[in-house]
């Protein structure tokens, strides 16, 4: 009974302590949270300093935000609330004042508690970069490997390790490992937050795909490479660890001596001075007590991230093609049909495929939009009913007719574009006329070459093949554009090749001679007719 009563009392005491510690976070969720944060930042900016209300008002006046507008009475209430929550402590320093008024103003002084400083520091860290992608400090893992190798060599040396050197190595090692482990947790938490999204567009998906395939793979490979070596170093250190820590404590007890002198005082030693710290380090890299190591969990997290990436890829492909797989729905519907009675099956068919009787009335759909007969009314296109017909039951428009849209600017732009094209073709005509008979010596422009090919193609299409006593001849190989005033004539000349040079390339016409001259333009009356 006494043991049970003692356990109950200890549990109640532990619960009360936890409640008091959690109360230190209350100001972060209060309606005036921004004012509380501004006050706490002033206290965190000093070390072992007690501040009065006038001191705080002077410091807050030089800042920006809600804290700069606080008056003395409101600030006093905020400070009292922080004292009640455990973030601040009342100062016990004596006050020196030259007058009663000065004493009344500065008699209440406050200083920061350890718990309040820790809570505000964590809050500032969350506000500074909680949503940012933190880079994994993988280079620290190589330093952890090197440090464990040096500690293992020191512990196995004859006569034992030098306590001062061992203390320096252990302190450095655990600081590096803590930074590495924290960066891994932060990065994978950010990665899980991103992969849980289902609104990634193509650019975001491409960026996260490169991140997973390159960066995460590099981290996992580095950890997988270093983990067996670190585990081997820990196995060699483990038999010498109790003696090594005892020698270090005998050399430099540090604040641990306070725990021996004052048993009721809780002491948090630096990392690496207790066996529990080494057990946590060992559990990170090796399987102990039937639990998987953090290295195995890191591999599993990487695999889940890749699976989430593939799921996002499938979703984007389905949304891009406009099709969704209905296999599961169809199998479920088939099972319902198999277990249904005939009347129930008819109802299922009606509900699933929209096979209703001719009792649905509505506006006729767009005749230019074809809808297959198997499309259900539930998933088919929606017919847009005019607002006038839906609200008044009449299509007759009301009110004043809208003014006709002015297309003069567009007409001017099209006329100008047509004029420029006509000028470009006329320039090509003039160029071909001047180059006729000396195509091998002139390099034509791109528009002129296109016009030449157009006329040559038409001429060869109009030509008739004729055979005389010696060879084949072309008759009627001619093309003309009366609007442009140009005519092209081609005839066959065996043994001669004509080369047309242009900026886009050269064209060689074997056994062919081409001539370009002017063609008579139609008269004005003929053009009008």
Image (spheres, rainbow, N blue to C red):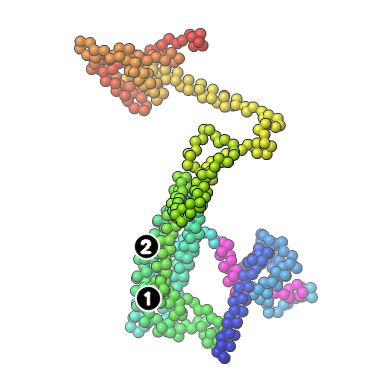
494 to 504, vertically: above or below: above
- Residue 96 picture quarter: bottom right
Instruction: Using the rendered image of the protein, determine whether residue 409 is visible from the camera's viewpoint.
Output: yes
Q: Would you name the residue on which mark 2 appears?
A: 221
Whole-percent x and y of residue 291?
A: 41, 73
Q: Could you say whether the residue bearing mark 2 is in a helix, strand or loop? A: helix
Q: Earlier in the sequence, mark 2 or mark 1?
A: 2
365 versus 58 height, above or below: above
| Residue 462 rendering spot, x and y as whole percentages | 34, 15
Magenta: main secondary structure equals helix
Residue 273, how many percent across, how many down?
46, 79
2 vs 496: above or below = below
Q: Are dots 2 and 1 in contact, CB under 8 Å? A: no
- At x 58%, y 80%, the residue is 14
Q: Residue furthest left?
A: 470
Q: What label sits on residue 500 in the rendered view?
A: none
Tell me the quarter of the picture where residue 395 sits. Answer: top right
What is the crowding at mark 2: few (fewer than 14 residues within 10 Å), some, or many (at least 20)?
few
Q: Magenta segment: does it hold 201?
A: no
Q: Quadrant of the N terminus?
A: bottom right
Residue 113 magenta-drawn?
yes
Residue at screen point 57% across, 24% down: 412
One can see residue 172 in this view: no
Q: Report the side of 89 relative to 429 (left or right).
A: right
Q: Residue furthest right?
A: 100
Residue at 32 percent across and 12 percent down: it is: 476
Callout 1 environment at 10 Å: few (<14), some (14 to 19), or many (20+)? Answer: many
Asked whether 441 or 282 is in front, the reply is 282
Please name the residue that numbered disc 1 is placed on: 234
Report the span colored magenta: 102-128
View extreme (front): residue: 342
Horizontal relation, residue 527 to residue 93: left or right:
left
């Amino acid at each position: 009974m006494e043991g049970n009563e003692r356990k109950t009392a200890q549990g109640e005491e532990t619960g009360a302590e936890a409640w008091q510690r959690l109360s230190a976070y209350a100001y972060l969720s209060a309606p005036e949270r921004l004012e509380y944060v501004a006050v706490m930042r002033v206290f965190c900016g000093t070390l072992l300093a007690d501040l009065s209300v006038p001191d705080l008002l002077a410091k807050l006046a030089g800042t920006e935000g809600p804290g700069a507008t606080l008056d003395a009475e409101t600030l006093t209430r905020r400070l009292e609330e922080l004292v009640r929550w455990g973030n601040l402590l009342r100062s016990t320093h004596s006050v020196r004042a030259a007058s009663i008024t000065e004493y009344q103003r500065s008699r209440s002084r406050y200083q920061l508690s350890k718990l309040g400083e820790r809570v505000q520091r964590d809050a500032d860290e969350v506000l500074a970069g909680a949503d940012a992608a933190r880079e994994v400090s993988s280079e620290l893992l190589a330093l952890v490997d090197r440090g464990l190798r040096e500690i293992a060599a020191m512990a196995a040396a004859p006569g034992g390790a030098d306590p001062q050197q061992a203390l320096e190595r252990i302190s450095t090692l655990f600081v590096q490992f803590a930074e590495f482990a924290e960066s891994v947790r932060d990065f994978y938490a950010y990665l899980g937050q991103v992969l849980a999204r289902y609104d990634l567009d193509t650019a975001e998906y491409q960026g996260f795909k490169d991140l997973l395939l390159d960066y995460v793979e590099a981290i996992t490979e580095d950890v997988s490479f270093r983990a067996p070596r670190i585990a081997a170093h820990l196995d060699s250190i483990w038999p010498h660890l109790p003696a090594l820590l005892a020698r270090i404590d005998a050399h430099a007890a540090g604040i641990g001596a306070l725990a021996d002198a004052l048993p009721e005082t809780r002491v948090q030693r630096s990392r690496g001075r207790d066996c529990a710290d080494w057990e946590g380090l060992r559990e990170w890299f090796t399987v102990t007590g039937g639990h998987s190591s953090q290295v195995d969990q890191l591999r599993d997290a990487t695999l889940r991230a890749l699976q989430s990436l593939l799921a996002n890829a499938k979703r984007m492909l389905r949304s891009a093609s406009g099709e969704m797989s209905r296999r599961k729905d169809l199998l479920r519907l088939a099972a319902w049909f198999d277990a249904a009675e005939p009347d129930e099956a008819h109802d299922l068919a009606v509900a699933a495929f929209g096979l209703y009787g001719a009792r649905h009335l509505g506006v006729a759909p767009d005749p230019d939009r074809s809808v297959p007969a198997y499309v259900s009314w539930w998933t088919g296109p929606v017919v847009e009913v005019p607002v006038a017909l839906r609200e008044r039951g009449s299509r007759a428009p009301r009110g004043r007719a809208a003014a006709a849209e002015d297309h003069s600017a567009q007409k001017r732009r099209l006329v100008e574009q047509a004029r420029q094209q006509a000028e470009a073709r006329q320039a090509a005509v003039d160029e071909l006329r001047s180059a006729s008979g000396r195509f091998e010596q002139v390099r034509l422009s791109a528009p002129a070459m296109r016009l030449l090919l157009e006329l040559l193609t038409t001429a060869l299409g109009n030509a008739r093949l004729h055979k005389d006593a010696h060879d084949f001849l072309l008759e009627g190989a001619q093309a003309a554009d009366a609007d442009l005033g140009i005519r092209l004539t081609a005839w066959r000349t065996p043994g001669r090749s004509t080369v047309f040079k242009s900026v886009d390339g050269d064209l060689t016409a074997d056994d062919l001679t081409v001539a370009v001259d002017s063609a008579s333009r139609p008269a004005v009356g003929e053009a009008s007719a």
